[in-house]
Amino acid sequence: MTIKAVGVVGAGTMGNGIAQVFAQAGFEVRLVDVAQPMLDRARGAIEKSLGKFVEKAKLTAADRDATLARVATATSIDGLSEADYVVEAIVEDVEAKRALFASLDGLARPDVILASNTSAISITVLGAATRRPDKVLGMHFMNPVPLMTLVELIRGQSTSAESMRVASALCERLGKTPVEAADYPGFIANRILMPMINEAIYAVMEGVGTPEAIDTVMKYGIHHPMGPLALADFVGLDICLAILNVLHEGLGDPKYRPCPLLRRMVAAGNLGRKSGKGFYTY
């Protein structure tokens, strides 16, 4: 199957980044979100990101303009009936994703692969909401998508080897490095990352160190490019909590129990960078 047109559902931070990298690689992209203001913000974010590439001489102005021209936006998924490949990047809620996959299944051509950018939710569960579970897989991009090269590819219980091959080849066309992960809660990246972030939050709650101290230790002692608490703010504390809940519920091990401080911060609306306040003030 020749993939030329790609649908991306969800115009948040991940969705607009995914749309950008597909458009930069020469694909025609239709970015869909229920709210026009979200689409307007997404286009602005893509323009800003491409502008930085131009400033750093990694992209020409002509290529920037051509990339932007390849991104169309819409508030309905109906136009995705013409897409050759679809990536879902909506809220990390299993029922919302299952409902979307069921709708996409009734809309997209039978040969079209439906991929999810979920960072923790079972691909098998999402595939079961469709009549094409062999063509449902996980395609977990890392944030920020235009800069990070890794993509976790997750094979559900029924995902075919051919679907995985197509997705892997697609990653390479995007200049990304695909790594296959099994369909366990959190896959590879978040199964390892989120317990570390959670433990850092426990360390704050128990007075082991300040956020600055904890992040400094991890940056200069362990050579992490960003401390776990600054990273949590960057990801979004609500997203971290959602992933930890999936790990805790899916694996049943108390070591994945979200820290009470994380729960309190999310309840207070202190979500990190996107709210202006998390472990740091922005």
Image (cartoon, grey):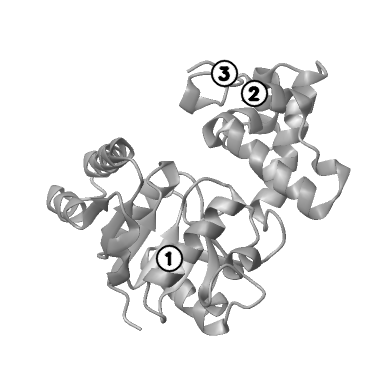
User: Marks 3 and 1: CB-CB under 8 Å?
Assistant: no
Mark 1 vs mark 2: give the one in front: 1
Confirm whether residue 241 shows in the render: yes
Query: Observer-nearest residue: 6 or 128?
Result: 128
User: Marks 1 and 2: CB-CB under 8 Å?
Assistant: no
For disc 1, the marked residue is 104
What residue occupies the far left of the structure in this picture? Answer: 62
Amino acid on which disc 3 is placed: Tyr
Give coordinates of residue 219: x percent, y percent: 63, 32
- CA gap between label 2 and label 3 equals 17 Å
Marked residue nearer the N-terminal end (1 or 2): 1
Near mark 1 (Cα within 10 A), the count class, few <14, some 14-19 or many ≥20, is many
Near mark 3 (Cα within 10 A), the count class, few <14, some 14-19 or many ≥20, is some
- CA gap between label 1 and label 2 equals 33 Å
**Residue 227, quarter of the rendered image:** top right
Looking at the image, residue 233 sits to the left or right of residue 218; the answer is: left
- CA gap between label 3 and label 1 equals 39 Å
**Residue found 41% across the figure and 81% down from its top:** 111
Marked residue nearer the N-terminal end (2 or 3): 2
Amino acid on which disc 2 is placed: Ala
For disc 2, the marked residue is 267
Give coordinates of residue 70: x percent, y percent: 20, 58
Confirm whether residue 119 shows in the render: no
Judge whether 223 appears above or below 130 on screen.
above
Q: SS at mark 1?
A: helix
Near mark 2 (Cα within 10 A), the count class, few <14, some 14-19 or many ≥20, is few
Amino acid on which disc 1 is placed: Leu
**Residue 198, quarter of the rendered image:** top right
For disc 3, the marked residue is 280
Quarter of the picture containing the N terminus is bottom left
Give coordinates of residue 167: x percent, y percent: 47, 72
